[in-house]
Amino acid sequence: MPEPKLLLRGARVVDPASGRDEVADVRVERGRITAVGAGLDPAGAEVMDCDGLVLAPGLVDLHTHLREPGFDHKETIETGTRAAALGGFTAVAPMANTDPVTDNAAVVHEVRDLGAQAGLCDVFPVGAITKGLEGESLAEIGEMVAAGVRVFSDDGRCVPSARVLRNALTYARAFEDVVLAEHCEDASLAEGGQMHEGYHSYSLGLRGQPSEAEEIVVARDLAVARLTGGRIHLCHLSSARSVELVRRAKAEGIRVTAEVTPHHLTFTDDDLVTYDTNFKVNPPLRTADDRDGLRAGVADGTIDVIATDHAPHAVEEKEAEFDGSPPGTIGLETALAAVLTELVEPGIVPLARVIDAMSPLPARILGAAGHGGPIEPGRPANLVVFDPAAEWTVEVPFASRSRNSAFLGRTLRGRVVHTVLRGALTVANGKPTR
Ligand code: NCD
Ligand code: ZN
């Protein structure tokens, strides 16, 4: 692939890793940033005028479902990483709930190789914690660490027993920088739940699952992290009380990080009144108080990371009856715009905090050393350029193979213009280049 010299001229450079927030030019050559500053020499470079645009480190998604191998009628690594590039991502971490499950090094290599072949986004596979996601014996964690995996998760399912989680956290401590990411859901309380349990579940006649299904496991996991000294990451928190538990645990020095999705920052259980299955997600959308608690958690850094939980499902799957349709919304193509619209535009969270939550922090957790900035000479050129003022309405077609977006029909503010992966444009002027 040709790697032209690029001069990204006159953008507002927002780089949380260096603290830079100023208008500057950025020059890119042979895959790397070679200069950052005012009035750089354009000689020999393709000049992209970025006046009025924001330039930031390429986004990093810590929680993505790319579905391959096994479910390529929902998504493939190629279609999913194209959606990611369009959303401004330069790295994604696909979850292990594929078929076969990513519970050994062979599947890790397969997923990573398919990502490299597509060449649209760096792919950092997440390994399973337990074999086959069965929650019993540990997966080939050591072998996967040797293959470069840093994040392990049984996402889609919770590690069912504190004992198994204790063993996994104790084992993982032997490896530097390894983190276990938990989908916090007590199966006995959540079972059969179609949405958040509360006023709306009663009035809609849908079976609910209470916030406590999440909070009980958050509390348990924090206790097991304290016991073992291991590192835990809590996926897609949905309840304000979960955020409070994490806040206290951090104050106590427990090694925990946490994540929230753009859809949990935007919607509430009130949105399910249309029975639109695109709002059926796991964990469920909860109350406005929960959403506000999640927003406050992002604002004060209790919630470290914003991750998409991009969960593609085929049209016929999502068109089934509410009870029979699988949970999940796609999110890669709308994540940045959703967060800019819901958090930055109304002044709830500053832009630099949002970028930090979508790039440097997830890059650090993932061990994705070439991502997340700083935007400085010598660093790999993984960058996003977006227009913070552009308004657009979310509609089909998507680059994703699926179209189950909770954001369909919504008008958002903020749009990705260019995405640069190791010096090459994967998206130019809002269009994929390949
Ligand atoms: C995820 C999926 O479809 O794989 N769905 C979802 O609603 N988040 C699995 C999961 O995390 O429950
Ligand atoms: Zn999950």
Image: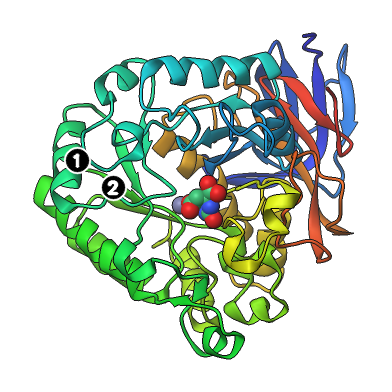
Disc 1 from disc 2: Cα separation: 8 Å
What residue is rendered at 63% in x and 82% in y?
270
Q: Which residue is mark 1?
A: 169
Q: Is residue 7 or residue 2 the one in the foreground?
A: 2
Check disc 1 and give the amino acid type: Leu
Q: Position of residue 308 (x, y in %)?
A: 58, 50
Q: Position of residue 286 (x, y in %)?
A: 51, 76
Which quadrant is the C terminus positioned in? top right
What residue is rendered at 57% in x and 14% in y?
113
Residue 196 versus residue 8 in the image, above or below: below
Q: Which residue is mark 2?
A: 232
Q: Position of residue 268 (x, y in %)?
A: 59, 76
4 on left or right of 30: right
What residue is rendered at 53% in x and 21% in y?
111
What residue is rendered at 42% in x and 72% in y?
239
Let me know if residue 357 appears in the view.
no
Which quadrant is the N terminus positioned in? top right
Q: Secondary structure at mark 2?
A: strand
Precedes in sequence: disc 1 or disc 2: 1
Check disc 2 and give the amino acid type: Ile
